[in-house]
Image (tube, grey):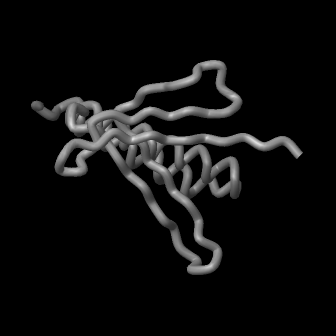
Amino acid sequence: MKKSMIAFEIDLDQNNLPEKIIWKASDSINTENSTKAIAISLWDPVQGNTMKIDLWTKDMRIDEMDKFLVDTLGGLAQSMLTATGDSYISQSINDLCDKLVSHIKNKKY
C-alpha cells in the first residue's frame, strides 16, 4: 500500500501567533511550500463530530481572508456533491458563496 504524508510547520511569535506557515507533502516535487492560512477539518468517528484547525499568519490581509474562506466554502460545495450527490446542499452553499462574493465586492477595506 502506498503512503503519503502532509506536514505543517508553524513559526510562532512570542505571543504564539503564527508568523510563517510551511507545508510539505511527501508526493510533492517542491520540498517546502509557504502559505498564509490553513483550514483543516477532521472527522472524529468516536465522538461523531468534526475537529478543526484554522491558522493564519499575522500578515494575512482581511481581503485575502475573505477570499480564502469563500473559496473554502465553494470547495466544500463541490465536495458535498462529489461525496454524496446531494445537489440541493451543494447548490445552497454555492448560492451563499455568490451572496458573499457580492458582499465582498462592495466591501471597503
Q: How many marks?
A: 0
Residue 89 x/y as whole percent: 54, 57
Figure quadrant of residue 85: bottom right
- In the rendered image, the quadrant that contains the C terminus is top left
Residue 28 placement, left or right of 58: right
User: 59 or 62, which is in the foreground?
Assistant: 59
Q: Residue at x 21, y 38 (%)?
A: 58
Residue sitting at the far right: 1
User: 108 or 17, which is in the foreground?
Assistant: 17
Q: Residue at x 64, y 57 (%)?
A: 86
User: 1 or 101, which is in the foreground?
Assistant: 1
Residue 71 placement, left or right of 77: left
Residue 51 x/y as whole percent: 48, 65
Residue 25 x/y as whole percent: 62, 33
Decide: is 17 above or below 26: below
Q: Residue at x 56, y 80 (%)?
A: 47
